[in-house]
Amino acid sequence: MSTSVVTVIGARPQFVKAAVVSLALKEAGVKEDIVHTGQHYDEAMSGAFIRELGIDNIVAQFACGNGTHAVQTAKMMTEFEGYLLSRDALPNFIVVYGDTNSTIAAALVASKLHIPIAHVEAGLRSFDRRMPEEVNRVVTDHLSSVLFCSSQEGVEQLKREGIVDNVVDVGDVMLDAFLHFSAIAATNTQEEEGTNKNKPFALVTIHRPSNTDVDENLVALLRELDSVQDYDFVWPVHPRLRERIKKFSIPNNVLLIEPVPYLAMLNKLGKCAAVVTDSGGLQKEAYWAKKPCITVRRATEWIETLEGGWNQLYDPTCQSLAAAIGELPKTPWKSLYGDGKSAMRIAIELRDRLSTAK
Ligand code: UD1
């Protein structure tokens, strides 16, 4: 019987992570089929990414992009279970990424079908259970058979939760992607469109429900962006905010644009002076690009980035953005989260485990 893995992806950052691991699996001779839950489905959130990243082994795609958490997760579980049972044979491993509803849905289905789960980005914690991602991470880790951590901190956290077997610090696959694709993105040397050439600009992304769904927080953020007139702010707007943002008055130094694909995002990151975000991934990408980052959250699971002030946690309702943006990192930049060779470590680890399953 031949062995194989099934990878489950669904949301934007998972396309980036899976793309580099998928390449490494191919190189390592591991057969991989990819299932796309359809959690993200827009051309800008999904199609453009998949093409640009060269993901070519998606064998099934569902339409689970809307609804409450329960509706979305339940739909994904039903579809994914149906897919697995329709195959000639169950895969030997399910590979899941990060902390989205696609991750937990796939993990729950796989565990009930007794398929071992490999979790990439295991052991991360924000310790904020009001974030749906925190719930997804904790449950997925506790269901997983192999846990790939992005740093030693993840390994230690899992140990504190009693998970010590099959935990491997492989580094961060997003660094692999960042290094590979930012070299390509940098070849576009066009100036940033729509901004004042005499001012620096900061790149803004906001998509966490705690920021997007609470008027008071959005109003405070817009007010603070307005107060820093010596910067322009370029803000690709996540679909979660597309309609809601229309009811607020947008400061003249804020440029709202459509979501951008990965290469364009890396290009903007290369050109910007700072980042303002509530994204997990962008906090690290800002760090790797050596740009100061202001994180609009109460906690981050990427705590290493906070050292020396490269990344600052920020609350617009009670803190000044001008003060935060004026604060320069206090320690020299050092490399974090591996060496850019994480995808191959994951592929080799899985290949070795599959060879004993043959
Ligand atoms: C999800 C993840 C989050 C991750 C983020 C990356 C969960 C719980 N959250 O959040 O961890 O950081 O993806 O972007 O899994 N929508 C569209 N078109 C799309 C995608 C979404 O219009 O292509 C709209 C839908 O109306 C949806 C809303 O945006 O209801 C939110 O999308 P959803 O996938 O539920 O969560 P995200 O906020 O994207």
Image: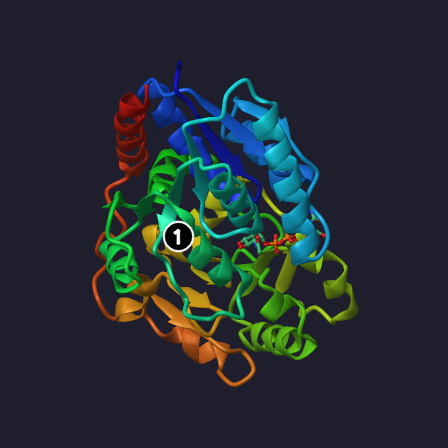
- The percent coordinates of residue 1 (x first, y second) are 40, 14
Within-10-Å neighbours for mark 1: few <14, some 14–19, many 20+:
many
**Callout 1 amino acid:** Asp
Task: Name the element at disc 1.
Answer: helix
Is 56 placed left or right of 342 in the picture? Answer: right
Point out residue 258 in the picture as x, y percentages from the top left corner.
66, 48
> With respect to residue 344, does 3 lie above or below?
above
Whole-percent x and y of residue 157?
Answer: 29, 62
Along the line of sight, the residue nearer the viewer: 326 or 50: 50
- The quadrant of the image that shows the C terminus is top left
From what the image shows, is residue 238 above or below residue 45? below
Q: Residue at x 60, y 36 (%)?
A: 80
Placement of 193 over or under 23, stated as above or below: below
Q: Nearer the viewer, residue 296 or 19?
A: 19
165 w.r.t. 15: above or below:
below
Q: Which residue is mark 1?
A: 141
Check mark 1 vs ligand 1: CB closer than 8 Å? yes or no. Answer: no
Q: What residue appears at the point 56 percent right and 46 percent down from the top-left corner? A: 105
Q: Residue furthest bottom?
A: 318
Q: Residue at left 49%, top 83%? A: 319
Q: Is residue 267 visible?
A: no
Q: Tell how many labels.
A: 1
